[in-house]
Amino acid sequence: MTINFYLRNPKKDGICAIYASICYDNNRLIVFPGEKVHTGDWINKEGKKNEPKASAKNGTLIGNLFKAEKLYRDIYDDLKVKLGGIVPADIFKKSIAEKKNPLVVKVVKPIRVRIADFFQRTIDDTKNGDRLSDKKLKLKADSIKPYNSTLAGYKAFELHKHKVFYMDEISQKLLDDYDKYLTQEKKLALNTKSRHLKTFMLMLRYGVTKKVADKNAVEDIKLCLRVERSDSIYLNDDEINDILNVTDFKTPLYQHVRDYFIIGCQTGLRFSDYSRIKKEHINNGKIQLIQKKVNERVTVPIHPIVEKILAKYPDGLPKCPPNQVFNSYLKEICAPLPSLQKVFEKKITRENEVVVEKFCKHQLVQSHTARRSFATNEYRRGTPAITIMAITGHKSDKTFLNYVKMDGEEHADLLGASWKK
């Protein structure tokens, strides 16, 4: 809360009424504490605090204004405790008027904040470090990207509704309508929809901390943020070798993409890590670096295939293109390969119904397929899960097992091979 006193007409030569401006929680009240002063006895210069000049003549006035400010703060503090943190302007006004002091209060309509505008502020505050993680750390750029896509989708929702929504309109109905739009109009997959809703709720909780969203209204919202296990592909050793054996490239950049992808398949690193490997990260037959996403050190032995790739670039690996470009080039490389023409049936929930969508395997290959392929292939080879997790950086079996993409027949073959041993 900030309280500033000012003159109604500071340029007037003579007696002038004193008003107080009370700003709090995106509200503003104009209060008349019943005091007046000659403009010649008032400091009203730009860059200086507006207040009575310090003099014996103004002693009583200064004391009265001090008491008035204390009164306003006491009333606000009492109401905040009684009302659980949110003090509506009309109740504050009534409480001030009920005091014995001859106060006249005028409520200035609070400035309303658009949801889209505050969403953008959330993104900006996250980028510049004003908004931190639960561990009080700056969020990574990769963590901010989902906010941009969710904001774009929310703006499309407002266009669909032909209406602009404000932070003081947050309600269960609004979120239900947004959920329905993502499900039925945009036909988003369950996991994608849940990610957007989760990001939206994180923005609303930040709004509570910034006093632009009603805490009770946000806490009362109930959403289904259910996710389903991703039905994604992995590449087995033969398929990886087929990609490794490609020799016809449109440009050198295509070969660079292929080489980086193979490195990912043999290291289990995330794209954000394997795409930035430098000579300084390689020592004594191992790759050692601080993982970008989790800020933890990882050590990966250099596979013979990776060793051959690194030998091609004695001055260090070439610059890797951005993820979106990388995925586009990778799909072009994989498209002609017969082993990746196989049909892959992908189960996914859309419009509250589980459907099966068919793809050629090459259509689903992307940068993250490398990490999933490493985890699955090492698991098939019988490498202990705890060893694989030490390389991939997974902290729980549940998360790690989401990366093991073996089908029922492959599990049966693995079990049969163990019996033979």
Image: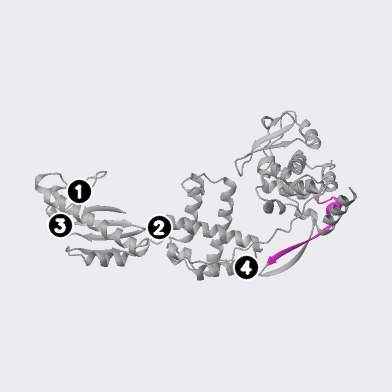
Q: Residue at x 26, y 67 (%)?
A: 94
Q: Locate residue 177, reporting x and y percent.
A: 55, 70
Amino acid type of the residue that numbered disc 3 sits on in the rendered structure: Glu
Q: Which circle marks residue 51 in the picture?
A: 1
Q: Classify mark 4: helix, strand or loop.
A: helix
Q: Sort mark 3 into few (<14), some (14-19) or many (20+) by Cα contacts within 10 Å.
A: some
> Please, which residue is most extreme toward the left here?
57
Amino acid type of the residue that numbered disc 4 sits on in the rendered structure: Thr
The N terminus, quarter of image:
bottom left
Question: In front here: 286 or 29?
Answer: 286
Q: Sort mark 4 into few (<14), some (14-19) or many (20+) by Cα contacts within 10 Å.
A: many
Q: Locate residue 266, reporting x and y percent.
A: 77, 41
Q: Residue at x 78, y 48 (%)?
A: 379
* Disc 3 target residue: 35
Mark 1 or mark 3: name the one nearer the start of the chain: 3
* 2 or 1: mark nearer the eye: 2
Stretch in magenta: 335-349
Q: Which circle marks residue 290 in the picture?
A: none
Question: In front here: 70 or 109?
Answer: 70
> Please, which residue is most extreme toward the right here?
420
* Disc 2 target residue: 211
**What's the distance in space between the residues labelled 1 and 4, CA to CA?**
57 Å
Residue 382 to residue 310: above or below: below
* 3 or 2: mark nearer the eye: 2
**What's the distance in space between the residues labelled 3 and 4, CA to CA?**
59 Å
Amino acid type of the residue that numbered disc 2 sits on in the rendered structure: Lys
Mark 1 or mark 4: name the one nearer the start of the chain: 1
**What's the distance in space between the residues labelled 1 and 3, CA to CA?**
12 Å
Q: Does residue 194 appear anywhere in the picture?
A: yes
**What's the distance in space between the residues labelled 2 and 1, CA to CA?**
29 Å
* Disc 4 target residue: 183
